[in-house]
Image (spheres, rainbow, N blue to C red):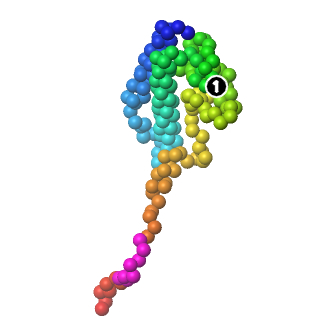
């Protein structure tokens, strides 16, 4: 892919991401939906917002990496193998860092000896997989913070309540 076309694709992606980030930042906080017993609607709105924010930040980081590769002259080549990424793939996703085959292997977990996954979080699996699907990370952290500290050790002083009958 020629440099001018690559610059145009990355500029278009930058504009799109800036608009999405601006829209996400301008959203009002989740309205009070549901009631105290059933706050699923509120949680759904919050969790969706968090997931969208994470995806946008991952795309923004990928955009910065792509711009660095363009400046270095390595844009359009796999960050893993150095093989050329087809122009059609870059047209579809200007932030692609791997060839289609490498991306598919990474998603299947078929990495070569000791390699770590490179690049974006998989678009097919953008959300974190939780150990307990009924408890969000925020709820787990809040429950840890709400635990009462153990009682202070006794100093050997015993105070009896004042009895007015005396």
Determine whether 46 is above or below 131 in the image. Answer: above
Q: Is residue 157 magenta?
A: yes
Q: Is residue 102 visible?
A: yes
Q: Residue at x 45, y 55 (%)?
A: 145
Q: Nearer the viewer, residue 154 or 132?
A: 154
Q: Nearer the viewer, residue 76 or 19?
A: 76
Q: Is residue 159 left or right of residue 67?
A: left
Q: Residue at x 41, y 71 (%)?
A: 152
Position of the C terminus, as image quadrant, is bottom left
Residue with the most extreme bottom position: 166
Where does residue 82 sit, x and y in percent of width and height? 61, 20
Q: Residue at x 31, y 84 (%)?
A: 162
Where does residue 40 sit, x and y in percent of width and height? 52, 42
Q: Which stretch did the figure color magenta? A: 152-159
Q: Is residue 41 visible?
A: no
Determine whether 133 is above or below 71 in the image. Answer: below
Q: Is residue 119 left or right of residue 156?
A: right
Q: Is residue 4 magenta?
A: no
Q: Main secondary structure of the magenta part?
A: loop
Q: Nearer the viewer, residue 93 or 66?
A: 66
Badge 1 marks a residue whose secondary structure is helix
Q: In the picture, residue 22 is in which quadrant? A: top left
Q: Residues within 10 Å of mark 1 (few under 14, many from 20)?
A: many
What residue would you read off at disc 1?
Answer: 103
Q: Residue at x 68, y 31 (%)?
A: 112
């Amino acid at each position: 892919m020629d440099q001018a076309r690559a610059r145009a694709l990355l500029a278009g992606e930058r504009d799109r991401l800036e608009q999405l980030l601006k829209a996400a930042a301008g959203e009002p906080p989740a309205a009070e939906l549901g009631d105290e017993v059933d706050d699923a609607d509120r949680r759904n709105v919050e969790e969706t917002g968090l997931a969208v924010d994470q995806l946008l930040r991952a795309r923004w980081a990928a955009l910065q990496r792509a711009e660095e590769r363009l400046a270095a002259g390595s844009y359009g080549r796999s960050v893993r193998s150095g093989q050329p990424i087809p122009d059609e793939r870059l047209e579809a996703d200007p932030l692609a860092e791997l060839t289609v085959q490498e991306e598919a292997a990474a998603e299947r977990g078929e990495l070569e000896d000791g390699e770590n996954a490179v690049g974006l979080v998989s678009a097919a699996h953008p959300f974190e997989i939780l150990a307990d699907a009924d408890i969000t990370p925020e709820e787990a952290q809040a429950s840890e913070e709400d635990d009462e500290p153990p009682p202070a050790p006794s100093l050997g002083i015993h105070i009896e309540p004042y009895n007015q009958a005396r």
